[in-house]
Amino acid sequence: MPPSTALTATGLRVTYDETEALSGVELAVPAGRITVIVGPNGAGKSTLLEVLAGARTPSAGRVETGALSRAFVPQRAAVSEHLPITVREIVSVGAWGRVGAIRRLPPAVRGDIDTAMHRLDIVALARRPFGTLSGGQRQRALLAQGLARGADILLLDEPTTGLDARSADLNRRAIAAEIDRGATVVCVSHDDGLIALADQVITLADGRVSRASAPSR
Ligand SMILES: Nc1ncnc2c1ncn2[C@@H]1O[C@H](COP(=O)(O)OP(=O)(O)OP(=O)(O)O)[C@@H](O)[C@H]1O
Ligand SMILES: [Mg+2]
């Protein structure tokens, strides 16, 4: 894998029962850039992102990331409504992988949690139980959790879908700030504002890459 490439996927196949969701996907993600995956509902975008994130094992093929760390923010978070956990705790979960079993987070990590919460404008919600947030507030908190991981590669599934204009803008700015610190971003999105930031746009159709290109600016 060339040093300018953060992640490559080769021959990815995923089959759910009868459905073949991915049918031989090949792609390369440039380091320090934004790649956006587009395509119609059911094209296999979320399945692909899960495999790229290491959250789903493909039936065939492989993903290579060298020694780079990954943070994944899924399309639908599996956080129970009834879990007694605050917004700040949800964001802090993102940092656990960086510090192992240490109970008190080091100041630098706490600083990154604060920065992520500021960027997504959820500081005022810090003590609220996560289950009491609106859908858009939850989405911002979960993106902040992904940022708090401080990972080399961020994989985001529809990070602006369903958000009002201001919240979508906050998310796009937070994503752009990750690129500025040297991270690589891969997002699934239909958002023209996010596609405009992309260095590469990959179109998925029926489980295959139908097009991979620099966007027309
Ligand atoms: N857990 C599952 N079990 C069975 N089939 C699944 C499962 N998850 C996804 N599929 C099927 O796999 C295909 C791809 O689904 P996927 O969620 O990856 O699409 P998507 O491109 O992300 O769609 P959307 O734009 O609606 O989010 C669809 O036909 C879907 O019905
Ligand atoms: Mg999806």
Image (cartoon, rainbow, N blue to C red):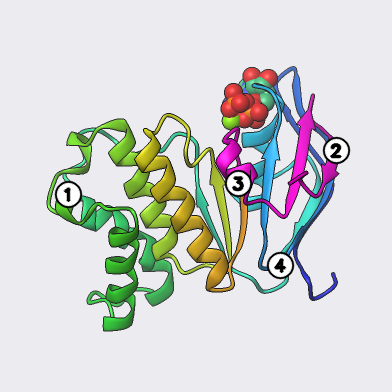
Amino acid tagged 3: Cys
- Position of 92 relative to 201 (above/below): below
Question: Residue 194: x percent and y percent?
Answer: 58, 44
Q: For marks 3 and 1, give the CA distance.
A: 26 Å
Residue 50 seen in the figure: no
- Position of 74 relative to 34 (above/below): above
Figure quadrant of residue 195: top right
Identify residue for label 1: 125
Counting residues from the start of the chain, the first of labels 4 and 1 encountered is: 4
* Residue density around tag 3, few if under 14, some if 14–19, many if 20 or more, within 10 Å: many
Identify residue for label 2: 211
Counting residues from the start of the chain, the first of labels 1 and 2 encountered is: 1
**Magenta segment boundaries in residue numbering:** 188-217
**Residue 210 part of the magenta-drawn span:** yes
Amino acid tagged 2: Arg
Counting residues from the start of the chain, the first of labels 3 and 1 encountered is: 1
- Quadrant location of the N terminus? bottom right
Identify residue for label 4: 31
Counting residues from the start of the chain, the first of labels 2 and 3 encountered is: 3
Q: Quadrant of ligand 1?
A: top right
Counting residues from the start of the chain, the first of labels 4 and 3 encountered is: 4
Which residue shows up at 83% across the image and 44% down it?
A: 212
Figure quadrant of residue 179: bottom right
Identify residue for label 3: 187
Q: For marks 4 and 1, give the CA distance.
A: 34 Å
Please say if the residues under marks 3 and 1 sit with CB atoms less than 8 Å apart: no
Mark 1 lies on a secondary structure that is helix
Q: For marks 4 and 3, give the CA distance.
A: 14 Å
Counting residues from the start of the chain, the first of labels 2 and 4 encountered is: 4
Single out the residue that lies furthest toward the bottom: 107
